[in-house]
Image (cartoon, grey):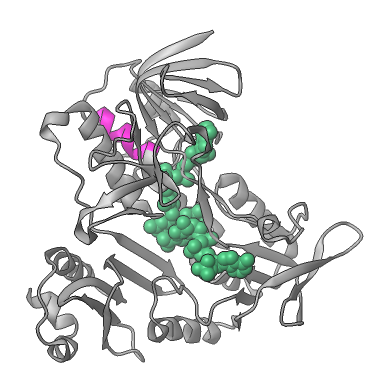
Amino acid sequence: MGRAFVYVIIGGGVAAGYAAHEFFKRGVTHGELCIISEEPVAPYERPALSKGYLLPEAPARLPSFHCCVGTNEEKLTPKWYKENGIELILGTRVKSADVRRKTLLTATGETISYKYLIVATGARALKLEEFGVNGLDATNVCYLRDLADADRLANVMQSCGGGNAVVIGGGYIGMECAASLVINKFNVTLVFPEAQCMPRLFTSKIASYYEDFYQSKGVKFIKGTVLTSFDFNSDGQVTAVNLRDGSKLPADMVVIGIGIRPNTSLFEGQLTMEKGGIKVNGQMQSSNASVYAIGDVAAFPVKIVGETRRLEHVDSARKAARHAVAAITEPEKTSDFDYLPFFYSRVFTLSWQFYGDNAGEVVHFGDFAGPTFGAYWVNKGYLVGSFLEGGTKEQYDAIACTTRLKPKIDDVAELERQGLGFALSV
Ligand code: FAD
Ligand code: NDP
């Protein structure tokens, strides 16, 4: 048994939603496009799961955050897909792929063939077991990658009704979940192995600002150590977290955010891989000409930094999705993807944006005791990256445009003196 489509997207996350919208805008014919997703719901804006979804009052729930509300465009509800003749095969995992035959086999036993395949399988959360710690079965240990995880997390938060929450990992999930837990009146301890939070992006000065802010909200930080084991009660629930430094933290619930691994396994040995993802060219096309990859799973040439990178952020997933569809439907009119990396986060009343590359010498600016401050990165004489906390739309646009222009910086001290004014004057 099988069906054939011109275009098939594997994965029903952010990249799939934006790709579907782009196909629609370009006039895809009814019955040509199919999305196969392991998740039981139509593509949605995943960033909502660690923010609006966890609010104590009026939390965000579907259908309010289906794609493409994140860019203020139309909301693609299941009805939208139906009306536009786009087949949504939900709650269905693709079990295997044969890129030579151009076929996919689903867990329900259906064979689906394609002319063009877009791989948008995203990533999975790394599990503690992979670091030799048991606890996966405990009902009060939570991860956060998809809607089912978010429901579980929200339920555990509700059943604990405050109490002690231990958050493991000082990256994006750790920082955003710690903030959400505090807003829900939990007593939060954040544990991570490094000397500061967000070590891959923040300078120690920037990290200190956020750590102080979190501490002012009651979050405790335990740095430079890792979790080694849990204590359990007779119901199999975690009651305490044991750390390598010998300390024991009582815990009513635990949230783990220790990174991800891209879902590439369907294509290992069939497509060229790089940086842990599927290597694509500037058209988002893989080593097989009929297969494209987008979102967290794709390693693509980031022209502005002159390197192939895999980015794990929503703006990149959205734009790469649109680009891949343009490249598939109008290859002769589509030049190579020229993407300016953009990362952001919003927690409490704080909000930051980062553009470009955090390489080279750092120039901090602004008032680190006040609401607005930032940093530039200057590499080999050029401004390559910009960070801003507490900016206005105009100021964020200015740092984005300036970073895109990669201006030559002859005098770093002068850049520091001008601070945000430099970006506003470029
Ligand atoms: P995903 O959105 O993860 O979608 C992948 C889809 O593929 C899923 O539906 C999955 O079930 C499906 N799938 C996988 N394998 C198969 C298979 N074999 N068969 C069928 N289906 C399959 N980024 C930001 O820039 N800002 C933020 O504020 C932000 N917040 C985030 C908050 C959370 C809680 C998380 C988890 C991520 C956040 N991100 C954020 C990152 C951002 O959401 C991702 O970069 C983005 O979702 C990547 O899109 P994607 O389509 O590649 O993958
Ligand atoms: P991150 O990679 O951001 O952070 C994981 C952190 O956990 C790192 O600091 C890592 O340290 C640390 N770590 C690794 N192993 C351990 C361990 N055994 N014990 C304790 N800490 C450990 O991943 P997250 O899980 O926070 O986020 C998952 C994905 O979701 C990412 O792709 C992220 O981009 C995305 N996301 C993005 C958001 C945003 O852009 N605003 C918001 C929420 C999620 P080390 O660096 O040393 O490996």
From where the camera sits, is residue 116 visible?
Answer: yes
| Dominant secondary structure, magenta | helix
Viewer-proximal residue among 154 and 136 = 136
Residue at image position (82%, 60%) is 237
Viewer-proximal residue among 29 and 340 = 340
Residue range highlighted in magenta: 16-24
Residue at image position (44%, 30%) is 78
Q: Is residue 414 above or below residue 350?
A: below
Q: Is residue 104 above or below residue 208?
A: above
In which quadrant will I find the N terminus? top right
Q: Quadrant of residue 148?
A: top right
Residue 411: x and y in percent read 11, 87
Residue 236: x and y in percent read 85, 57
Residue at image position (45%, 74%) is 199
State the residue lying farthest toward the right.
Answer: 234
Q: Quadrant of residue 425?
A: bottom left
